[in-house]
Amino acid sequence: MDGLSSIVDQLEEDIVFGRRRPRERLVEEDLLTTFKTKKHVIRQALVDLEQKGLVERIRNKGAVVRDYSPDEVRHIFSVRRLLEGEAVRQIPLPAPADVIAALEEVYAEHAEAVEDGDLHRAFRSNIKFHQVLFAACGNPYLAETIEQFAFKSHAIRSYSLANPKLLRNARDHHRAMIDAIRNGDRKALIDVTIRHLRPAEAAYIAAYESFFGPAARHTG
């Protein structure tokens, strides 16, 4: 299972960091050579990535990196705004000290990774920050649904994660979220949570339309 998990993580990061682009084929034979493993492990890794929304299987073509059209991206982020906005509305304010301490700890890790240009740590600590944040709403089903939609957005974030300016913006938004929670400012917390989603959505749509044209639609 450790081998499978590491392969899934590596392919996930390849997609998120833009090393594998939308519509790119994931050829089993190539992956077998890259990861030096068995065929059933690669196939299970592709199944896991498909369940996360990062990969899809197209008839007569095989597995490819999931290609979201601009309309699909807008729909996904519309749902994310609803879910995440509702989650922060449910976070108790003033928040317990242990919640703030946990957020501060992950924030420090993420900020250091951004400063160092360490994309791997920035990506993983960003996920952890949002898990801690939305778990604080006290509704595990809402937090789980948010995480499912966040997985769908990983491929979408491939156009923004490696951008130093957008990474710094994300770090600053995290700081603002913690400050709003610490200050008991619900309005500011909701506002920055919603604004936090916009750069990745806009960057993906702009890049997609640049590559495929403004009228391009997903054809898988």
Image (tube, grey):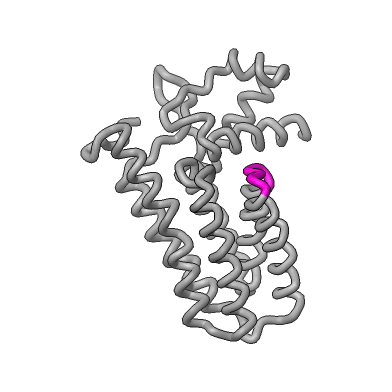
User: Residue 210: x and y, percent?
Assistant: 30, 36
Location of residue 77 (image quadrant): bottom left
What residue is at 64 percent from the left and 86 percent from the top?
94
Q: Which residue is drawn at 47% across and 81% down?
A: 187
For the point 54% across and 84% down, the residue is 185
Q: Is residue 40 left or right of residue 187?
A: right
Q: In this view, which residue lies farthest toward the left? A: 215
Looking at the rendering, in which quadrant would you find the N terminus? top right
| Quadrant in which residue 13 is drawn | top right
Q: Residue at x 70, y 55 (%)?
A: 112
Q: From the top left corner, tell me how far across and down residue 194 is, in percent.
A: 44, 67
Q: Is residue 85 magenta?
A: no
Q: Which of 69 and 60 is in front in this view?
A: 69
Residue 39 screen position, x and y as percent: 66, 18
- Please state, as top left, top right, bottom left or bottom right, where the C terminus lies in the image: top left
Magenta: predominant secondary structure element? helix
Relative placement, left or right, of 194 versus 210 is: right
Instruction: Choose between 146 and 128: the one closer to the eye.
Output: 128
Please state the horizontal and vertical placement of residue 202, each as a whole percent of the image: 37, 51
Front in this rendered view, residue 196 or 4? 196
Q: Does residue 201 appear left or right of residue 126 in this picture? A: left
Rendered position, 45 above or below 214: above
Give the residues drawn in magenta, as a range: 116-121
Count of numbered labels shown in the rendering: 0
Q: Is residue 189 above or below residue 159?
A: below
